[in-house]
Amino acid sequence: MLGNLSGWHLVILLVVILLLFGAPKLPGLARSLGQSMRIFRSEVKTMKDENSSDAPTDSSSDSNSDTPPKP
């Protein structure tokens, strides 16, 4: 889809974005987008860390649940 864009298409797209948002607002827009991406990456990393730390504890508890309790 984006592979068909040439240099002129990108220039026109940038001009349209500049007209829509205005030059003074573009740095703030880029800054907020960067902060959002940073937050998203940190949340994804936190979720991966939680999943990787939960995996060994779940497997050890599963192996203990298979053995019957001692009377």
Image (tube, rainbow, N blue to C red):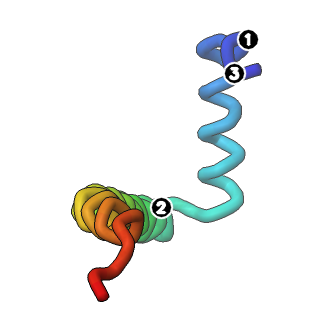
Question: CB under 8 Å between callouts 3 and 2?
Answer: no
Identify which amino acid the numbered label 1 is placed on: Asn
Residue at x-position 44% and y-position 62%: 33
Viewer-side label of 3, 2 = 3
Q: Where is residue 23 in the image (x, y as percent from the top left)?
A: 50, 60
- What's the CA distance linking mark 1 and mark 3? 5 Å
Q: Camera-side residue: 62 or 67?
A: 67
Residue at x-position 40% and y-position 64%: 66
Question: CB under 8 Å between callouts 1 and 2?
Answer: no
Q: Earlier in the sequence, mark 3 or mark 2?
A: 3
Name the residue carrying label 1: 4
Question: CB under 8 Å between callouts 1 and 3?
Answer: yes
Name the residue carrying label 3: 2
Going by the picture, which residue comes out furthest to the bottom?
71
Dot 1 falls on a residue whose secondary structure is: helix
Q: Position of residue 68 (x, y in %)?
A: 38, 73
Name the residue carrying label 2: 26
Crowdedness near tag 1: few (<14), some (14–19) or many (≥20) residues, C-alpha within 10 Å? few
Identify which amino acid the numbered label 3 is placed on: Leu
Q: Dividing the picture into quarters, in which one does residue 34 lie?
A: bottom left
Vertical position of residue 46 compared to residue 17: above or below: below
Is residue 31 visible in the rendered image? The answer is: no
Crowdedness near tag 3: few (<14), some (14–19) or many (≥20) residues, C-alpha within 10 Å? few
Q: Earlier in the sequence, mark 1 or mark 2?
A: 1
Q: Position of residue 11 (x, y in %)?
A: 61, 28
**Viewport quadrant of the C terminus:** bottom left
Q: Camera-side residue: 41 or 4?
A: 41
Q: Position of residue 44 (x, y in %)?
A: 38, 60
Crowdedness near tag 2: few (<14), some (14–19) or many (≥20) residues, C-alpha within 10 Å? some
